[in-house]
Image: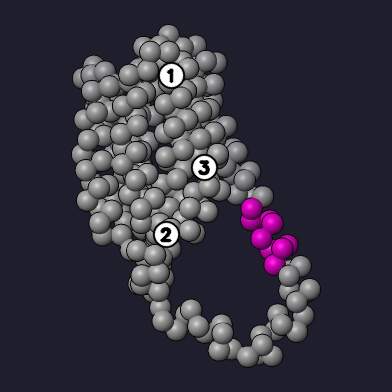
Amino acid sequence: MLAFFALLGLTNGDWLARIPALAHGLHLSDGMLGVALLATPAGSVAVASLAGALVDRIGSRAPTTLAGIAVALLPISFGLAASQVALMVGMFVFGVAAGALDVSMNAQAVQLQTAVGRQLMTSFHACYSFGALAGGLVGGAFAWRNVGPTPDFTAVAVPLAVLALVAGRFLLVRGQGAPVGAASSGEREPAAARPEAARPDATAGRRRRVRLSPLLVLSLLALCSLLGEGA
């Protein structure tokens, strides 16, 4: 599981470090580059709900593996792009793959965390951060040696794609690892023992208020993060 978080971080760190080379090769102004980079988050947003529905339907193992391989290989298209439009198409498709991987690997991580019975999510996200740091160092090293983006992305993509293919064999299948008592504990509990059964309207309203506020805060944080990254 750690391999997929590291893969996404390393891939992002590598190609983001080569943005100046991509812009120089295509003679993009700052404004044109900003528009091109918008394609990646647009792809991630477009696929988020679809990826969630797919994971609910077939599980997270296959989507995580396939999206991991795609995320590893697609940056090669950035270096091969001959125009801004081609770069945007490649970045949009990469955003779709990265968004699908983000959703599916986090679902897989929750499944693994439930099976193990202890908190693992912070370790997974820390692995993404270390991967991004390593990817930035790798991209910077290639840039320092005056290596073009395409050889750089290819050298990183091939081993990462193999890693995703191998690591995917060890992911949990749908329903695997779920605690036996957890699934049926809610069914065995009498309705009268649950306070929300007595006051469904009040409880539902309280839940809606609790869920709305964190969502708005996270949305604002994401907006600020993307604005800073784009600038």
Q: Earlier in the sequence, mark 3 or mark 1?
A: 3
Q: Is residue 163 left or right of residue 72?
A: left
Circle 1 — which element? Answer: helix
Q: What residue sits 49% from the left and 25% below the top? A: 37
Segment colored magenta? 207-215
Task: Indicate which label's residue lies in the foreground, 1 or 2.
Answer: 2
Q: Residues within 10 Å of mark 3 (few under 14, many from 20)?
A: some
Q: Residues within 10 Å of mark 1 (few under 14, many from 20)?
A: some
Q: What residue sits 66% from the left and 60% below the top? A: 211
| 228, 79: nearer the viewer | 79
Q: Are marks 2 and 3 in contact (CB under 8 Å)?
A: no
Position of residue 141 measured from the top left corner of the image (x, y, whole percent): 24, 27
Instruction: Answer above or below: position of 81 versus 139.
Output: above
Q: Residues within 10 Å of mark 2 (few under 14, many from 20)?
A: some
Asked if the magenta segment contains residue 208, the reply would be yes
Instruction: Answer above or below: position of 1 versus 141.
Output: below
- In the picture, the quarter occupied by the C terminus is top right
Q: Which mark is residue 132?
A: none
Magenta: main secondary structure equals helix
Q: Is residue 53 left or right of residue 91?
A: right
Any part of residue 32 in sight: yes
Determine which residue is flagged by label 3. Answer: 47
- Mark pair 2, 3: CA separation: 16 Å
Determine which residue is flagged by label 2. Answer: 59
Determine which residue is flagged by label 1. Answer: 86
Circle 3 — which element? Answer: helix
Position of residue 149 measured from the top left corner of the image (x, y, whole percent): 29, 21
Q: Callout 1, which amino acid?
A: Ala
- In the picture, the quarter occupied by the N terminus is bottom left
Q: Callout 3, which amino acid?
A: Val
Q: What residue sits 47% from the left and 30% below the top? A: 92
Q: Callout 2, which amino acid?
A: Gly
